[in-house]
Image: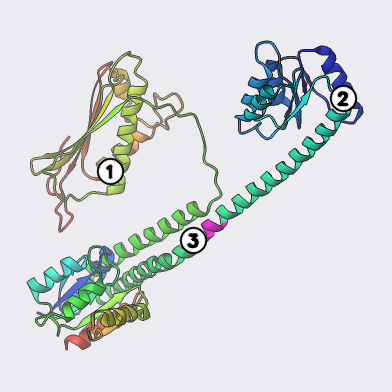
Amino acid sequence: MKKVLVVDDDADVTKLVSKLVERAGYEAIVAKNGVEGMGKVREDKPDLIILDVVMPKQSGIRMYRELKTDELFKDIPVIMLSAIAPKSFFRSQQVLDEFRGQSIPQPEAYMEKPEEPEELVELMKKLLG
Amino acid sequence: MVVDDDADTVELLTKRLSAEGYHALEAFDGEQALQKVAEYGPDVIILDIKMPRIDGYEVCRRLKSSEDTRIIPIIMLTVKAKVPDKVKGLDIGADDYIPKPFDYREISRRVRYWSTVKREVEERVDEIRRLEQELIKSERLAAIGQTVGSIAHYIKNVLFGLKGGVYLVNVASKEHEPDSLQTGWEIMERNIGRMSDLVLDLLEYSKDSEPEYEICVPNEIAIIMDLDPSLREVILDPKGIQQCLQNLVSNAIDACIFDPSEGKRWTVHVRTMREDDRAVGFKVSDNGCGMDEEIKGHLFRSFFTTKEGRGTGLGLLNTQKIVKQHGGTITVDSEPQRGSAFTIRIPFRDVTTGEAIAKEGR
């Protein structure tokens, strides 16, 4: 069974998205911040990651960059799911790219809360085949 | 207001000031002067220095050191126009100085001048106060503006929860999934709660309420915490249990305050305990006034209070209700003059399923 990692500090979001993941026929793994999220990535090697931006301990911005700069994990597709406007997220990535002289690819998808749950389910199915 | 222990001076000055249209007040010593200032709030004070008991310097010092009266101009009046006397008067805050014997025309000019100054100062002070109020208000509005972004962020999260909840309830009724129905419904309920919390907090923040001041006397009651380090994650309703503990601790403090004993070192102990693998215990004990059998018998009855109008008589009842909803127990141990101890036991729930592991029997 394919595994989907849901990283969000809001317990209702992880509960809801896990339910959507399970209904779509995948296994849901949950983490509540970037540090815990990276731990689960190493432990469970998920097939898809659904990632929030604003979280305590380690934000989604940092976790995303850590993922995409790691040879082992850089090909795992990522759906960003956040109440932060996509413009702000992409701007922050651009600034960090310039500052560090990196060129991190953009996530597979960016969904701004409150996105329709159907859209998330469809996108998940499309990315996981 | 004219203050002088010499009745002739007072009479002369009040008569002439009245003739000029002033409402002239008289005082014949320092004590009377202070009393009348508090009562009538004069616009200018003509103050003699040499008076029995409270002299003019002292009256001036007291008036100038109080926030309420320092604005009132004081013209010092004395027989000796010696430089050291003048300096002393001015040092403690007198605004002007007229030597005796005086010419009334000089008094008249000075009184007119100082009453105009006072009126202008008052107007400025009012203006400053008004501006201060406006500043506070606009700062608060700016703070609200800055937080609009984070409020929007919060609401977007809540909306996502609501949409998700509705989605789950919809698919549950179509596809017959009771499990999704429950999850969806729970998520919706919680997010409606978050929304109302936000609205209430915002209203509280934007309200123009004044603090309700009262006299608060520090007590000498020590509060000692003794927390069991072996306690791990537990499942309970944090708001409810917090309410229970707040209630028990404030009762314990009241029991110490109501204790008539003398020279006691009052303490309130708050303890948490892990009881095997079955329950988490909270114990709140005090060495206050304690309770006799009769009071103990009434403890968990509605509207019963020993706090002489300060309690609602619902605190313990509410605590008991919350504890019972958790499947737990609350027990009391108390002796008059020795103190009371309330112990709450909440049975452990499974951290993953939330199901009760063991039911506590009474």
Residue B142 rendering spot, x and y as whole percentages? 51, 61
- Looking at the image, which is closer to me, A77 or B191? A77
Question: Who comes first in sequence, dot 2 or dot 1?
Answer: 2
Numbered tag placed on residue A59 in the rendering = none
Checking the image for residue B103, the label placed there is 2
Residue depicted at x 21% and y 81%: A78
Find numbered disc 2 in the image and state the secondary structure of the residue it sits on. loop
Crowding around mark 1 (Cα neighbors within 10 Å: few <14, some 14 to 19, many 20+) is some
Judge the density around disc 2: few (<14), some (14-19), many (≥20) Cα neighbours within 10 Å.
few
Q: How is the image coloured?
A: rainbow
Asked which secondary structure carries label 1, the reply is helix
Magenta stretch? B138-142
Left or right: B43 as drawn, with respect to B227? right
Badge 3 or badge 1: first in the primary sequence = 3
Q: Main secondary structure of the magenta part?
A: helix
Dot label at residue B144? 3
Q: Chain of mark 1?
A: B
Q: Is residue B178 visible?
A: no
Whether marks 3 and 2 lie on the same chain:
yes
Mark 1 = which residue? B241
Locate residue B1, reporting x and y percent.
Answer: 78, 25
